[in-house]
Amino acid sequence: MKIKILILFSFILISKSLFSQKYLNYYKIINIAEINSIDKNFLKADSIYQEAFSLVKSPFKEDYFLAAINSEKLGNPKKVYSYLKLSLEKGLLFKRIKTKDFKNFKKSIFWKKLKVERKQLEETYLSNINVSLRDEIHEMIEKDQKARRPIFGGWKQMKKVDSYNFNRFLKIIKENNNKWPGFSLIGENTPKGKYNVTGNITLMLLHFSKEQVEILKPYMLKAVLDGEMYPYHFARVIDYSGLKGGVKVIKKSNGKKIIEFCAFYGTYFNESICDCVEAEKERKKIGFEPLGDYYRKVSSSYTCKNRKL
């Protein structure tokens, strides 16, 4: 009997490990597709996108959307239509299908077809998520932002809101079988793309204390490995909280002391990275693309500057 239990336990551990590895591979291949698209290797990028989408059960909305933009550059309106459909089913805002990105597609019959199907696609998305929980979290984010406006907020109000949001988050996790409220539960909620935290849970997490982030970190990390959260969003929270970053007191020539901060993953362009080599290793562990690729994708000329402490 003990042997059977041990075998079952080992099988569960192996299954979880393989599942996590699938998404790590997915992130890696998606990055290769994006870089090929940036390099104008559109046909190759499309092939790699298809490879990535076949790896996991639930590819991401933003990746389908970028694949659609790549297909537009290929001059394939039918494929653009297919990718946009998949993206809309995962919550893409229709207003993001802008003419500047889809000029040729909007001249095709597939654009008219997509407009007709829009309502049904949006309804499909809403039927697959917990709308009430999504709306509650949106309200929490709005209160977080309102508390930080001079007219409505103040230090005490911010602390009150942050405390409520953190404790409510813990309850939400508990109610969700000790899992992060991720994409499959409340949708992606990335109205400005995956490298932006507007309207996303991450925006609220940036205002939690280092100790609170430490408590939430295991749930966030598992969400990344399970395809429930973008690697960037996890890294952004860790960098902002200073959980794994560093602080250095520097004495200037005039005798004045200043504090310099350094980031662990390198999500911020206005901060040095604690250790560029270490950052690359740690980024790989969570499926976050290499620094050079990341900077290219966000159109930044920033280069990694070591600031070892």
Image: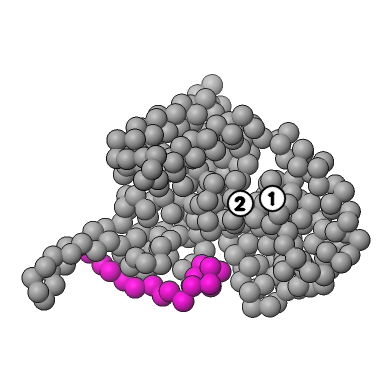
Q: Nearer the viewer, residue 138 or 84?
A: 138
301 left or right, relative to 43: left
Give the spatial CA distance, label 2 vs label 1: 7 Å
In the rendered image, which residue does mark 2 sit on? 191
98 left or right, relative to 30: right
Q: Quadrant of residue 161?
A: top left
Q: Is residue 57 visible?
A: no
Q: Is residue 169 visible?
A: yes
Q: Earlier in the sequence, mark 2 or mark 1?
A: 1
Quarter of the image with the N terminus is top right
Q: Residues within 10 Å of mark 2 (few under 14, many from 20)?
A: some
Q: Residue at x 69, y 46 (%)?
A: 91
The residue most toward the left is: 255
Res 161 label: none
In the rendered image, which residue does mark 1 sit on? 93
The residue most toward the right is: 109
Query: Marks 1 and 2: in contact by CB < 8 Å?
Result: yes
Residue 301 magenta-highlighted? yes
Q: In the rendered image of this protein, does residue 42 appear above or below residue 89?
A: below
Q: In the rendered image of this protein, does residue 14 appear above or below residue 25?
A: above
Q: Residues within 10 Å of mark 1 (few under 14, many from 20)?
A: some
In the rendered image, residue 282, in percent from the top left (x then y), is placed at 41, 59
Segment tinted magenta in the rendering = 293-309
Q: Secondary structure at mark 1?
A: loop
Amino acid type at mark 2? Pro
Residue 141 magenta-highlighted? no
Q: Residue at x 34, y 73 (%)?
A: 305
Dominant secondary structure of the residues highlighted in magenta in the image:
loop
Q: Residue at x 76, y 55 (%)?
A: 84
Q: Nearer the viewer, residue 170 or 289?
A: 170
Amino acid type at mark 1? Leu
In the rendered image, residue 105, in percent from the top left (x then y), is placed at 82, 65
